[in-house]
Amino acid sequence: MATVAEDIGLPPVLSHGDLWANNVLWKKNPDGSISNELAAIIDWQAIHEGSMTNDLARFVVLCVDGEVRREHEFEVLEYFYEIMVKLMKEDGREVDFTYEQVEKAYKVNCIAQTMQLLIMGPFMYQDKDWSPEEVPIKKAQLEKILLRSQFAMEDALSYMDEVPVEKLA
């Protein structure tokens, strides 16, 4: 999967490699509530040259519930592409790739991130020394992760039709 973005003509970019909710920090409003303003992105040890859709796919697959992801992910991807085109034009640079190429790379990255979710999800909720009050909460959280995983797997399987088998190794 590492070369699919390159194979479809997308330039390599700097990828965080582990972008998910716990690695995004938000500024606080004066009243102490969380604002919409980004404070920092942390935990950069997985940084690498990669696909422009890797971090977006990771965040969306790992952090967004399946029904919300399905409803909005391609709206978000289109916005991502539009902003990228706008910023590159403002910088005097040509965009020599299409939204369709970006969408294909996104789907490939969704396959990879789904595999990560299937591996990580259950380990996050192994039996621990939870108090009796925590047990129903943790079980509900696990069920939510399992449903997110199911939806991601269903979609990843449909995306696999668009990826050459030799690229899935």
Image (cartoon, rainbow, N blue to C red):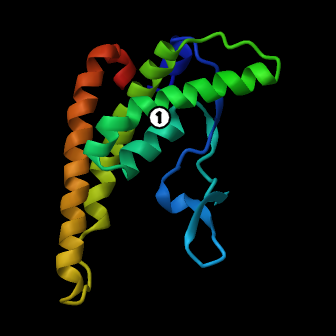
Question: At 61% from the left edge and 78% from the top edge, which residue is drawn?
Answer: 31
Q: Residue furthest front?
A: 31
Look at 25% across and 49% down and name the residue there.
148
Q: Nearer the viewer, residue 139 or 98?
A: 98
Q: Which residue occupies 48% across, 53% down?
A: 20
Query: Does residue 46 appear anywhere in the picture?
Result: yes
Which residue is outermost to the right? 92
Q: Is residue 139 above or below residue 135?
A: above
Q: At x 56% / y 31%, what residue is drawn?
A: 80
Q: Residues within 10 Å of mark 1 (few under 14, many from 20)?
A: some
Which residue is tagged 1?
A: 76
In this rendering, is residue 3 above or below 62? Answer: above
Quick check: 118 left or right of 36?
A: left
Can residue 51 be seen in this snapshot? Answer: no
User: Is the N terminus in the top left, top right, bottom left or bottom right quadrant?
Assistant: top left
Q: Nearer the viewer, residue 90 or 143?
A: 90
The picture places residue 78, in percent across and down from the top left corner, at: 49, 26
Image quarter of residue 140:
bottom left
Q: Is 151 displayed left or right of 5 in the figure?
A: left
The x and y percentages for residue 143 are: 18, 61
* Viewport quadrant of the C terminus: top left
The amino acid type found where label 1 is placed reads: Val
Q: Is residue 156 left or right of residue 29?
A: left
| Quadrant of the rendered image containing residue 160 | top left
- Location of residue 85 with respect to 64 vertically, above or below: above
**Residue 105 appears at what percent x and percent y?**
46, 23
Label 1, secondary structure: give it.
helix
